[in-house]
Image: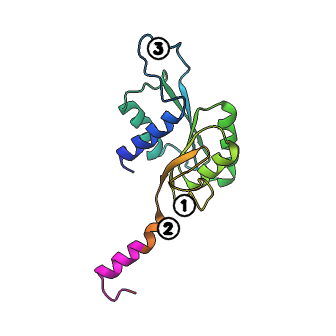
């Protein structure tokens, strides 16, 4: 995923939460606690997506610790642990959940209907029931899809054009 796509996801999700992160301008309302971003992942440790999330926020001028905090729930490949980890994030009171896979997004969806969920890398969010449609996602989920299902046929078509007689 490009840094521009990740920044788009971040901006979209953070604007969804109370109209974005506090700007830190003088004269603003009383300081708010840092936005709590919960990350749900099946990985064993920090992923490029989590690093990109943090780096993207820093590049946009936000300050870790004073404006945002990231808490990651690693399930170390255990898909059955995702629902428990998602409920922990909800009970902790995160402002936004960032899910980095199909399974993580589904677990987050089952854990809350109120907290915004931003997913990435989901193959078929409509088919999984995460969103109603690409035009009108509905609910509390949004994100970026890989469109693998829609692109598979087009890729085969291109291969056939490039290599006549391909079977």
Secondary element under disc 1, as helix, strand or loop, is loop
Q: Nearer the viewer, mark 1 or mark 3?
A: 3
Disc 2: CA contacts within 10 A as few (<14), some (14-19) or many (>=20): few
How far apart are the two marked residues, 2 and 3, measured between alpha carbons? 46 Å
Question: Which residue corresponds to mark 3?
Answer: 28
Is 161 magenta? The answer is yes
The reply to whether dot 2 and dot 3 touch (C-beta < 8 Å) is: no
Among the two numbered marks 2 and 3 on one chain, the one whose residue lies closer to the N terminus:
3
Q: Return the residue at label 2.
A: 149
- What residue do we see at 43% from left, 68% from top? 151
Question: How many neighbours does mark 3 have within 10 angstroms: few (below 14), some (14-19), or many (20 or more)?
Answer: few
Question: Which mark is first along the chain, 3 or 1?
Answer: 3
Pointer 1 with pointer 2, Cβ within 8 A: yes
Question: What distance separates the C-alpha of mark 1 from that of mark 3?
Answer: 41 Å
Give coordinates of residue 81: x percent, y percent.
68, 49
On the picture, is 70 further left or further right than 163? right
Check whether the beta carbons of the residues at disc 1 and disc 3 lie within 8 A of each other: no
Mark count:
3
Point 64% across, 53% down: residue: 78
Question: Which residue does the image show at 66% across and 42% down from the upper left?
Answer: 86
Question: Residue 139 appears at what percent x and percent y?
Answer: 62, 46
Q: Which residues are magenta?
A: 154-166
Residue under label 1, please give it.
Answer: 124
Residue 67: image location, x then y, percent = 48, 24
Q: Main secondary structure of the magenta part?
A: helix
Q: Is 88 placed above or below 159 here? A: above
């Amino acid at each position: 995923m490009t840094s521009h796509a990740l920044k788009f996801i971040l901006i979209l999700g953070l604007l969804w939460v109370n109209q974005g992160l506090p700007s830190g301008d003088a004269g603003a309302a009383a300081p708010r606690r840092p936005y709590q971003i919960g990350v749900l992942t099946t990985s064993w440790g920090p992923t490029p997506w989590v690093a990109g999330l943090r780096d993207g926020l820093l590049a946009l001028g936000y300050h870790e610790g004073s404006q945002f905090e990231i808490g990651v729930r690693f399930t170390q490949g255990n898909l059955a642990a995702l629902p428990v980890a998602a409920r922990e994030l909800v009970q902790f009171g995160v402002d936004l959940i960032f899910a980095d896979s199909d399974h993580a997004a589904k677990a987050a969806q089952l854990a809350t209907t109120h907290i915004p969920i931003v997913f990435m890398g989901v193959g078929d969010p409509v088919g999984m029931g995460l969103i109603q449609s690409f035009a009108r996602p509905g609910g509390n989920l949004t994100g970026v899809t890989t469109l693998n299902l829609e692109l598979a046929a087009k890729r085969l078509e291109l291969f056939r054009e490039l290599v006549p007689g391909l079977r």
